[in-house]
Image (cartoon, helix red, strand yellow):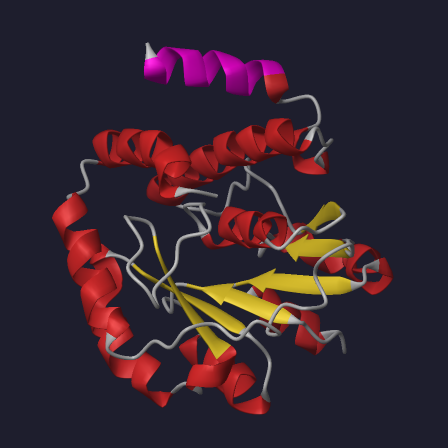
Amino acid sequence: MQFSEWKPPYQRILTDFGYDAAGDRQARDIAREFASTPSDGLFAEIPGSTVAIAGAAPCLSDELKIAERAEYVIAASTAADTLAENNLSVDCMVTDLDKNPDTSLELSKSGTPVVAHAHADNIPAVREWLPQFRQDTTVVTTQTRPDSPVVNYGGFTDGDRAAFLADAFDAAELRFLGWNVDDPTVTDAKRRKLEWAERLLFWLEQRRDGNFAPLRNRREQIVSATTTTEG
């Protein structure tokens, strides 16, 4: 995805949350010190594959068969821990280093690709953790304009960024587990982020002419909310 395509929803996110784009740019520039250009072969297994996008909602433990049947598994944040607890390995982890950076560090050092996100609110974590990661297994992303070797595949939360990553590398099909935008256990702030994740998934679904399970029976609601926000 070109940044010109991603920029309009990104700007709406900034407005909705009152974020400052300058903070994201600062985080990107700091992260560049610890980033390297992604290897061409790092995601070589994604093109043409069925990719499971594992979110971290409590329902994840009940949906493990989706990961078992996939050819490639991308875990968002703590989903990597839940999968490991159930003896399921991940092929990639997407994280903004806010909950389980030790897991992403361990995966990086073991050779599993880790996609680490830098944004305005996690600069201390970027400074602390990225220098410890293996550069050849770590891809650093931003939500503002990319500046090589920091890249931007699109997406806002760990979960939807995982889906945009799979799309960027030409996954044949995306399957979802551990997704619940109505999760009653999350904070109000997290719920707002999940609402944006859902909107972005809807956008990606349309781009791919797909049919994403987390959006079942929710598309009219998403269209209404999006129209209200953009209007």
Q: Quadrant of residue 112?
A: bottom right
Q: Position of residue 174 (x, y in %)?
A: 72, 46
* Residue lying farthest to the front in this orientation: 40
Q: Is-magenta flag for residue 221?
A: yes
Q: Is-magenta flag for residue 47?
A: no
The total of numbered circles placed on residues is: 0
157 relative to 175 in the view: left or right? left
Which of these two is toward me, 106 or 114?
114
Q: Position of residue 77 (x, y in %)?
A: 51, 64
Q: Quadrant of the C terminus?
A: top left
Segment tinted magenta in the rendering:
220-230
129 relative to 94 in the view: left or right? left
Q: Position of residue 207 (x, y in %)?
A: 60, 30
Q: Residue at x 72, y 67 (%)?
A: 45
- Please determine whether, in this image, residue 28 is positioned above or below residue 130: above
- Please determine whether, in this image, residue 59 is positioned above or below residue 71: above
163 relative to 4 in the view: left or right? right
Which of these two is toward me, 70 or 139?
139
Q: Quadrant of residue 135?
A: bottom left
Q: Residue at x 39, y 59 (%)?
A: 151
Secondary structure that dominates the magenta span: helix
- Please determine whether, in this image, residue 16 is positioned above or below residue 170: above
Q: Residue at x 60, y 41 (%)?
A: 180
- Please determine whether, in this image, residue 72 is positioned above or below residue 168: below
Q: Position of residue 184 (x, y in %)?
A: 52, 41
